[in-house]
Image (cartoon, grey):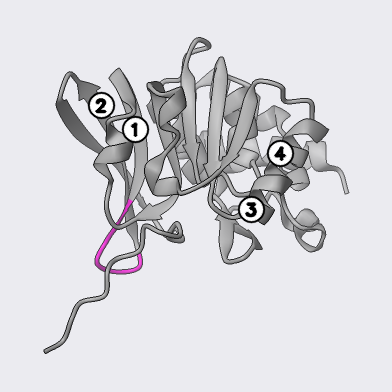
Amino acid sequence: MDYALSRSNMIEGQIKTNRVADPYVLDAMGAVPREVFVPTSKKGVAYIDDALEVGNGRFVLEPMVLARMLETAELDENDIVLDIGCNTGYSTAVLAKIVSMVVAIESDEELATAATNNLSQIGIDNAVVVTGDMKEGVEKQATYNVILFNGAVSHLPDSIKNQLADGGRLLVIEQGKATMSNVCVYTRNGDIFSKHDIMEAGVATLPGFEKEAAFNF
């Protein structure tokens, strides 16, 4: 299979047509081999316009959704980014092509190991994958210019918001009442967080960020 052609078709047919024009994002997503980050059985469909399951109920984000989030983040080559729920490392690799440093956190030890191996395989040397509780972020490396969530969440913990630098951008997918979630960006100005909606998307929930079950009496 011609993966390079598939990447080019993804950029032209899925990303550019969905109002993504940031050259850094387009170049990074055109350079990272998405097929490396999915199971062997899914390599042939690595570039379809959909999220792809990579194991243990976890998904690599749909290319268009990730691209819209990254463009909204207004990434800079000097940024330090926290990538939450990196699973096999695809988003981390794309970010690492643009920014100075990426700290990725993953709660699933098997996926975290795969992410580390995948990043090494394609020569990414400005990213590190940490195994731990995703709700806690990685405080010892804070603060971050950008924080990115790779899945839907029912709530946004203060422990993570507090790791965002002043002027930083936090990209998150907030669970809605139905099947669609709201992709949005929070911008920090001192202790004030302003929110801007980007789009709706159907995205799987990150473990640990599920809605709490209601009690019935």
Would you identify the image quadrant in which residue 157 lies?
Answer: top left
CA gap between label 3 and label 4 equals 11 Å
> What segment is highlighted magenta in the picture?
174-179
Q: What element carries label 1?
A: strand
| Residue found farthest to the left | 217
Residue 187 is tagged as 2
Q: Is residue 176 magenta?
A: yes
Q: Position of residue 93 (x, y in %)?
A: 65, 32
Query: Does 177 sit left or right of 131 as displayed?
Result: left
Query: Does 106 sit left or right of 126 as displayed?
Result: left
Vertical position of residue 55 compared to residue 33: above or below? below
Q: Position of residue 82 (x, y in %)?
A: 47, 31
Q: Mark 1 points at which residue?
A: 170
Instruction: Check whether the beta carbons of the residues at disc 4 and disc 1 lie within 8 A of each other.
Output: no
Of the numbered discs 4 and 2, the one sitting upstream in the chain is: 4
Q: Is mark 3 on a helix, strand or loop?
A: helix
Task: Tell me what residue is drawn at x 26 percent, y 75 percent.
Answer: 213
CA gap between label 2 and label 1 equals 6 Å
Q: Name the residue under label 3.
A: 109
Would you identify the image quadrant in which residue 110 lies?
Answer: bottom right
Q: Position of residue 37 (x, y in %)?
A: 72, 46
Q: Which amino acid does label 4 sit on?
A: Thr
Disc 2 crowd rating (10 Å Cα; few below 14, some 14-19, many 20+) is many
Q: Nearer the viewer, mark 3 or mark 4?
A: 3
Instruction: Check whether the beta carbons of the residues at disc 3 and disc 2 lie within 8 A of each other.
Output: no
Q: Name the residue under label 4.
A: 116
Q: Position of residue 60 (x, y in %)?
A: 59, 51
